[in-house]
Image (cartoon, grey):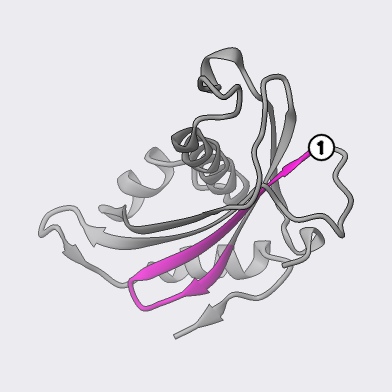
């Protein structure tokens, strides 16, 4: 995916506490970086999580699946860019794509990681899958540069 297809971009600098004995970012921290971009995405939609969603719709979203492909390594003090978007809107699920890039990398370079996250919308009373609210779908469609697939 091309970087310019991502509207939600979060920047950070790798901290000393995030590197391991090999002096590279410990693998689980990449998911923390992606999770922070997830929060920024919801802010950009005007639906801060959890108050702007859970309180408004009596729904919550739960991570069902996370797939990460590690293509490179970030190191202490690297400046990183996390690109984040919705690629698919299902009946009750949303699939997100993320890429983490080292600042200054050329578009022809590969990202350090790619990730796919599938979240399921759940009714908080029954704890069962529930259809995504139409308002959320409309906000995602209006926000994204590349239209999410829908099923």
Image position of 95 (left or right of 76): left
Q: Which residues are drawn in magenta?
A: 86-102
Tag 1 residue? 103
**Dot 1: element:** loop
Q: Work out whether residue 99 or residue 119 is closer to the camera in this orientation and state it.
A: 99
Question: Taking 94 as reference, is 77 left or right?
Answer: right
Residue 68: x and y, percent?
49, 54
Quarter of the image for residue 5 reads: bottom right
Of the pair 60 and 101, the residue shown nearer to us: 101
Picture quarter containing residue 108? bottom right
Q: Relative to 83, is 22 on the left or the right? A: left
In percent of width and height, residue 102 lies at 76, 39
Picture layout, residue 129 above or below residue 117: below
In the image, residue 3 sits, relative to residue 148, either above or below, namely: above
Which residue is found at the position 52% from the left and 14% from the top?
A: 17
Q: Confirm whether the magenta stretch covers residue 91.
A: yes
Residue 19 coordinates in the image, percent (x, y): 55, 22
- The quadrant of the image that shows the C terminus is bottom left
């Amino acid at each position: 995916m091309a970087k310019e297809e991502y509207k939600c971009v979060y920047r950070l600098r790798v901290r000393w506490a995030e590197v391991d004995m090999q002096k590279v970012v410990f693998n689980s921290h990449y998911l923390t970086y992606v999770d922070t971009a997830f929060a920024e995405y919801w802010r950009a939609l005007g639906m801060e999580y959890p108050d702007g969603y859970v309180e408004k719709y009596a729904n919550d979203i739960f991570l069902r699946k996370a797939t990460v492909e590690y293509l490179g390594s970030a190191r202490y003090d690297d400046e990183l860019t996390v690109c984040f978007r919705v690629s698919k809107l299902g009946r009750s699920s949303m699939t997100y794509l993320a890429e983490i890039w080292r600042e200054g990398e050329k578009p022809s370079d590969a990202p350090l990681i790619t990730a796919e996250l599938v979240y399921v919308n759940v009714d908080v009373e029954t704890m069962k899958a529930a259809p995504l609210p139409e308002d959320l779908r409309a906000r995602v469609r209006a926000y994204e540069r590349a239209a999410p697939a829908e099923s």
